[in-house]
């Protein structure tokens, strides 16, 4: 399904150089992962990076790991080093409004396929490792290849796609992608808190601060919620129902 929504795509770095006639093409590998798929507040960020296969061990030496297991400070430190040593890296920002609009025509797994494909189009590696956003990892790889082929018919048959659950634990390139995505989302969340002059916590549905912020906002605005919230999320629907039962609009 063609998607007409325009994403915010940040091609933040490109350390690649043109090969001379005597140089042989190097095997390029990539990793793609998301940060912020589940939150009810804020964007989702898809991170991707490309590096020469012969240099991929550098990521291990840097100590990259699952971004959720690292402190914010450590993630920020690693993000700078990852960007420095990568051939190129990309971060795709998908706003709450875009997520809501996409969910009108597809499920969240399909949204992930579209977003991962957008990042893959920028990287164009020989081999890519992705964190599967589907209960069936192989199906996610097949759908990703199909989506990628829409704008990259020739490359789509040549690229190798390895889709695994917990790929951010298994493959350093995916761990690195997860880190730069998480750091970018954290930056945006900080900016939003300043812009809205509110501490809404992490933005995840399980966070009491997040739920309290949304409940108070809905109560003060007749059941309406701020644009930084994903209106299609069950959390919003539940709070709206709570307000209705309490006699609010």
Image (tube, helix red, strand yellow):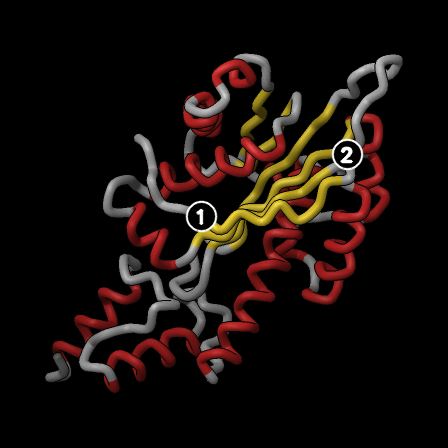
Nearest the viewer among 104 and 167 is 104
Quarter of the image for residue 20 reads: top right
201 w.r.t. 45: above or below: below
* Residue 31 rendering spot, x and y as whole percentages: 64, 36
Instruction: State the quadrant of the N terminus.
Output: top left
Tag 2–tag 1 contact (CB < 8 Å): no
| Residue labelled with disc 1 | 7
* Residue 113 rendering spot, x and y as whole percentages: 43, 35
The Cα–Cα distance between marks 2 and 1, rounded to whole angstroms, is 24 Å
Horizontal arrangement in the rendering, residue 124 relative to residue 225 (left or right): right
Horizontal arrangement in the rendering, residue 48 relative to residue 146 (left or right): right
Q: For the residue labelled by badge 1, is the local secondary structure a helix, a strand or a loop? A: loop
Residue that appears at 54% across and 52% down: 35
Residue that appears at 78% across and 60% down: 77
Q: For the residue labelled by badge 2, is the local secondary structure a helix, a strand or a loop? A: loop
* Residue 170 rendering spot, x and y as whole percentages: 67, 36
Residue that appears at 25% across and 72% down: 239
2 w.r.t. 138: above or below: below
Horizontal arrangement in the rendering, residue 187 relative to residue 21 (left or right): left
Q: Residues within 10 Å of mark 2 (few under 14, many from 20)?
A: few
Instruction: State the quadrant of the C terminus.
Output: bottom left
Q: Which comes sooner in the sequence, label 2 or label 1?
A: 1
Q: How many marks can you see?
A: 2
| Residue labelled with disc 2 | 16
């Amino acid at each position: 399904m063609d998607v007409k929504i325009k994403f915010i795509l940040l091609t933040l770095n490109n350390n690649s150089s043109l090969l001379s006639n005597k140089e042989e093409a190097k095997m390029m590998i990539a990793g793609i992962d998301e940060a912020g798929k589940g939150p009810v507040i804020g964007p989702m960020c898809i991170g991707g990076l490309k590096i020469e296969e012969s240099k991929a061990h550098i990521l291990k030496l840097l100590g990259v790991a699952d971004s959720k297991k690292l402190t914010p400070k450590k993630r920020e430190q690693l993000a700078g080093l990852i960007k420095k040593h990568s051939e190129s890296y990309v971060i795709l920002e998908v706003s709450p409004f875009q997520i809501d609009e996409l969910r009108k025509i597809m499920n969240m797994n399909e949204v992930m396929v579209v977003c991962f494909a957008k990042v893959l189009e920028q990287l164009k590696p020989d081999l890519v490792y992705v964190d599967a956003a589907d209960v069936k990892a192989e199906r996610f790889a097949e759908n990703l290849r199909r989506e990628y082929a829409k704008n990259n018919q020739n490359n789509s048959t040549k690229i190798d796609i390895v889709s695994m659950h917990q790929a951010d634990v298994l493959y350093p390139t995916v761990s690195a992608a997860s880190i730069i995505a998480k750091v970018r989302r954290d930056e945006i969340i900080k900016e939003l808190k300043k812009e809205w002059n509110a501490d809404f916590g992490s933005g995840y549905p399980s966070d009491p601060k997040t739920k309290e912020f949304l409940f108070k906002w809905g109560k003060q605005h007749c059941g309406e919620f701020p644009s930084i919230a994903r209106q299609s999320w069950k959390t919003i629907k539940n709070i709206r129902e709570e307000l209705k039962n309490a006699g609010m609009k």
